[in-house]
Image (spheres, coloured by chain):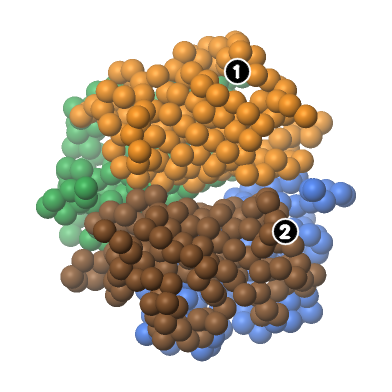
Chain colours: A orange, B green, C blue, D brown
Amino acid sequence: MGILMDKDALDAFLRREFPQIGDDFSIEDVTLEGARVRLNVSDKHLRPGGTVSGPSMFALADVSVYLAILARLGPVGLAVTTSCAIDFLRKPASGRDLVASTRLLKVGRVLVVGDVLIHSEGMEEPVARASLTYSIPPEKPDS
Amino acid sequence: MGILMDKDALDAFLRREFPQIGDDFSIEDVTLEGARVRLNVSDKHLRPGGTVSGPSMFALADVSVYLAILARLGPVGLAVTTSCAIDFLRKPASGRDLVASTRLLKVGRVLVVGDVLIHSEGMEEPVARASLTYSIPPEKPDS
Amino acid sequence: MGILMDKDALDAFLRREFPQIGDDFSIEDVTLEGARVRLNVSDKHLRPGGTVSGPSMFALADVSVYLAILARLGPVGLAVTTSCAIDFLRKPASGRDLVASTRLLKVGRVLVVGDVLIHSEGMEEPVARASLTYSIPPEKPDS
Amino acid sequence: MGILMDKDALDAFLRREFPQIGDDFSIEDVTLEGARVRLNVSDKHLRPGGTVSGPSMFALADVSVYLAILARLGPVGLAVTTSCAIDFLRKPASGRDLVASTRLLKVGRVLVVGDVLIHSEGMEEPVARASLTYSIPPEKPDS
C-alpha cells in the first residue's frame, strides 16, 4: 500500500482549500509514515526581535500532521485537530525558515496521533516539539 | 497588593510592543487572578466554512495568559511561553468573537502556569481549553 | 436527565472492577457536570520526604474523570484514556489527602474531555491541574 | 564531556533514594542524549484484562526522563516534574515488559524537556508517547 496523495496532490489541495495560508508552507517530503513541511518565514510570522511567533510554530505543526494524514488516508473531508501539546525549546534562529518533521504514531479508525519536531533550517537543535491528535469523523460528524 | 498594569496600561503595551496583532485583541477585564480577553474575529482568523482557525485560538490563549502575567508582575521583559496543552472541544459559532477567560494557577519565581477557557461570545459551552506555562527569566536569560 | 450512576453505584463498580485500587479512592460527590474524588493517601503514594508521588496524582486525575464519565453515561464498558496533560504546580502538603475536582468540558459521541484541579485537603492553592481525553468506543473497538 | 552517572551509579541511586519503586525499573542503556529504561511488569502494574495501567506507564515515562537528567547533570538534588503530556496509543501486549526510550530535547539552566516513546518489549508499534518537563532548581528552591 502506498500513499494516497503525493507531494503535488497535497500541494494543490492545500492551495485550493486553504488559500489564505497555502503559500506559507512548502511540502518537502511525504511518506506513509509522515511528512516534512517548511514554513516559508515572512514578516507576518515574526515577533519583535525577529523570532518566529508561537502561533506560527503551532500552525506549522498542525498543518504538517494534517498533510501527513491526507497522504496516508486520502482527502478525508473533515479531519479536525482535537488536541495539541507543544513545547517551545529554544528561540528559532532569525532569518531562517522552519522545518517540521512529522511522524504518525497511530492511525486508528477514529483518532490519529502525530509527533512533530521543528528545527530552524540547518540547525541541529530543535526549536519546538509537538504532538497532535486529529479526529477522523465517520459518516456522520460528532455533534 | 494590587495589579501592576491595568486594562489601559496593558492595552497600550500590547499595541506598542506587538503592533502586528495588537488590534486583534481587546482586554475586557483583568484582576490579580487572571484576565478576560476577546479575539476580534476577522477574515484572517477564519478557515473555510467560517470557523475560527486553531492557530487563532492558540494565539488568543497565549496572549491572554501573557496579559494576565503582565498585570500581576508588571512589564517583565522576557516572559516566554515554554509549553501549551490545548484541547479543541467544539466548533466555534460562526460570526461571533471568541472570549478567553484566564486564571493564573501558579505564579512562581521562574514558572507561571495559566488555565484558559475559550467561548464563542454568548455561548455556554466552551470551544477550547488550554493551559500554558511561561518562563520568567531571572537577571540573565536561559541560554 | 439525571446521572446514570450515583455515588454508591460508582463506589461498588470501582471496588468490583478495580480491586487493586478501589480502596485508594473515595467518591465525595458526583453530578452531571463532574465529580469530586479523594485520594486516601497512604505510604504507597509517598515519595521520600513524604510528598505524594506524581504517578499517584496522575492516577487520581485519571480515576476522577473516569468516574465522572460513568456517572454521566453509565457503565460504558471500554472507555479508555487516550491522552493526559498534567501540570504539577506545587508540593502537596504532607499528611493530607488529595481531592480532585473534575468537570466534564465535552461529552461527545466518541471523545470526552475532562478538566481536573487537585488540592491538598483544606488548602486553597491547587497542587496540580490536568486535562484528560477518554475515547468512548462504539459497538466495535478501535483496532 | 561524558555522562556524570553511568548505569550502575543510576541503579544504585534509584534503589537507595526510591526503595519503594527501585525494583520496578531496570536501566538498559544511558547516554548523554537519553536513556532506555524497562518497567519490569508485575501484577501491581496491571489492570483487569492484564494490560499495564496508565499510571504505570506515566511512572515509567517520568522515571526514564529523571534518570536521563541524572546521567547528564549528576545527582541534582531536587529536579522535579513540572508537566507531562502523554498519549496512550494502543494497548500494551499482555505478558510483556514495557521499554521507554527517552531523548533529552533541551537541557537548559532551569528547564529540561525529555521525549519518551514506550513500547511493549519486542513490538514495533509504540504503546504510548510522552513529553515531560523537569525544573532544575538553583540554589534556593522555588516556593
Mark 2 lies on residue: D91
Amino acid at dot 2: Lys
Q: Crowdedness of circle 2 by 10 Å Cα count: few (<14), some, many (20+)?
A: some
Answer with the quarter of the image where residue C122 lies: bottom left
Mark 1 lies on residue: A7
Q: Residue under mark 1: which chain is it in? A: A
Spatial separation of the CA atoms under disc 1 and disc 2: 33 Å
Q: Estimate the x, y position of residue B134 in percent, counting from the top left.
A: 31, 49
Quarter the N terminus of chain C occupies? bottom right
User: In this orientation, which residue lies closer to the viewer: C79 or D42?
Assistant: D42
Amino acid at dot 1: Lys
User: In this orientation, which residue lies closer to the viewer: D118 or B131?
Assistant: D118
On screen, C87 above or below D46? above
Q: Residue at x 48, y 65 (%)?
A: D29
Q: Crowdedness of circle 1 by 10 Å Cα count: few (<14), some, many (20+)?
A: some
Q: Estimate the x, y position of residue C47 in percent, counting from the top left.
A: 44, 81
